[in-house]
Amino acid sequence: MKIADILKRKRSQKVVTIGQDKTIADAVVQLNARGLGALLVVDDDEKVVGIFTERDVIRALNHGSWGEVAAIVVSAVMTRDVECVAPHTETLDALEQMEKRRCRHMPVLDQDVGKVVGVVSIRDLHGAALDRLQFEHEAMKEVLTATGVSVYVPPVQ
């Protein structure tokens, strides 16, 4: 399965952004209202300059109370080194990238159109990996049954 397949299955394919001059409080409102874990941070020209995640909120709160942190602009705490994945990337390859970088969200950059076309989460990729395992499990059971091999294959839970 490819990243493009995951984007097609998502309930919303809209890329949600926030301006780099907006506050952490503004970002938290958007994250909560949309049920998201990350927002892409854009400059005045709508160019992606970073990613703001739930983890950024937690890290900021480590340095002060909510009253102090809420007014800080997202560009002060966002991740600037944003690694993207392409729509044609295999989901397991993307999952490996995320595991290596220890990140939970990755923008999907379509270089053919020169823009970000979505964001995938590690939850999206784990779901795709589980789907693949279940498919392989069923295929293996069918092959074994068709060949008359008596082997117990425990169910996937």
Image (spheres, rainbow, N blue to C red):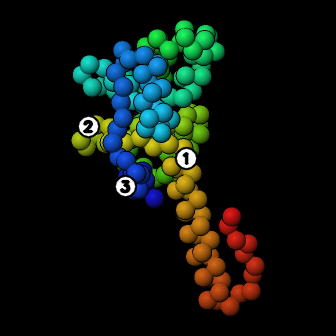
Query: Contact (CB < 8 A) between labels 1 and 3?
Result: no
Residue that carries the numbered disc 2 in the rendered image: 114
Horizontal and vertical percent for residue 149? 71, 87
Q: Earlier in the sequence, mark 1 or mark 2?
A: 2
Residue 38 percent across, percent down from the top left:
47, 33
The answer to whether residue 20 is left or right of residue 120 is left
Give the position of the C terminus as an image quadrant: bottom right
Query: Crowding at label 1, few (<14), some or many (≥20) Cα neighbours within 10 Å?
Result: few
| 20 relative to 38, above or below | above
Residue named by callout 1: 123
Considering depth in this image, is 94 or 120 the residue closer to the camera?
Answer: 120
Which one is in front in this view, the residue at disc 2 or the one at disc 3?
Answer: 3
Q: Nearer the viewer, residue 46 or 146?
A: 46
Q: What amino acid is found at the position of numbered circle 3 in the picture?
A: Lys
Residue at the spot 52% in from the left edge and 56% down from the top edge: 128
Q: Position of residue 133 (x, y in %)?
A: 60, 64
Question: Mark 1: which amino acid?
Answer: Arg
What element does badge 1 sit on?
helix
Query: Which of the 4 quarters of the picture holds residue 62?
Result: top right
Q: Which residue is mark 3?
A: 8
Residue 96: quarter of image: top right
